Amino acid sequence: MSEPINVRMSSKEVLPLFPTLLWKSQLSPETYEPLNRRIMAKMDELTASEPPLKPRGMWQTDQRFNEIEGMEDLDRIMRGTAKASLDSLKVRYDDFAITGC
C-alpha cells in the first residue's frame, strides 16, 4: 500500500449528499495530465488481449485498480485525498481502506 501524499488541487468542495458528505476534489493540470496518460496506457495494456467491444459495451477493471503495478501515483493521490477528508472531520484513525476503485 502506498503512502498518501499531499496534492495541489485546483478546487475542493464538501457537498451534502443524502445523510453523508461527499468530497469533490479537482486535481491540478500538472497532476492530472501525466496521471491520465499513465491510466490510459495501463487500460490499453490491460485490454489489449480483450475482444473488441460491441456497441455500447464496456469493460470493468479490477476493483483494486489503484493497487496494480504502475498505478502507485493514483493510489497515493487517492490515499492523500481520503486522509485530508478524514482529517478535516477530525476523525481519529490508525489506517483506512480504499475499496471499489
Image (cartoon, rainbow, N blue to C red):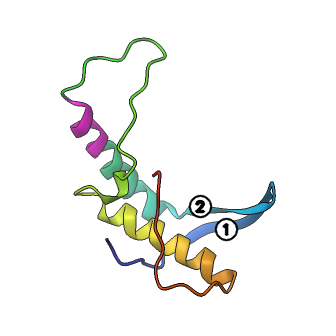
Residue 46 part of the magenta-drawn span = yes
Decide if residue 41 is on the left or right side of residue 32: left
From the top left corner, tell me how far across and down residue 35 is, in percent. Answer: 37, 57
Q: Residue at x 81, y 59 (%)?
A: 19
Callout 1: SS: strand
Residue 90 vs 18, above or below: the answer is below
Residue 51 part of the magenta-drawn span = no
Please state which of residues 87 and 70 is positioned toward the viewer in this rendering: 87
Q: Which mark is residue 50?
A: none
Q: Which mark is residue 12?
A: 1
Q: Mark 2 is on which residue type?
A: Gln
Number of labelled discs? 2
Callout 2: SS: strand
| Mark sitting earlier along the chain (1/2) | 1
From the top left corner, tell me how far across and down residue 43 is, in percent. Answer: 30, 40
Answer yes or no: do the residues labelled 1 and 2 have beta carbons within 8 Å? yes
Q: Residue at x 53, y 71 (%)?
A: 81
Measured in 3D between alpha carbons, the distance from the residue under mark 1 to the one under mark 2, in whole angstroms, is 6 Å
Query: What is the magenta range?
Result: 41-48
Please state which of residues 19 and 54 is positioned toward the viewer in this rendering: 19
Residue on which the image places disc 2? 26
Q: Main secondary structure of the magenta part?
A: helix
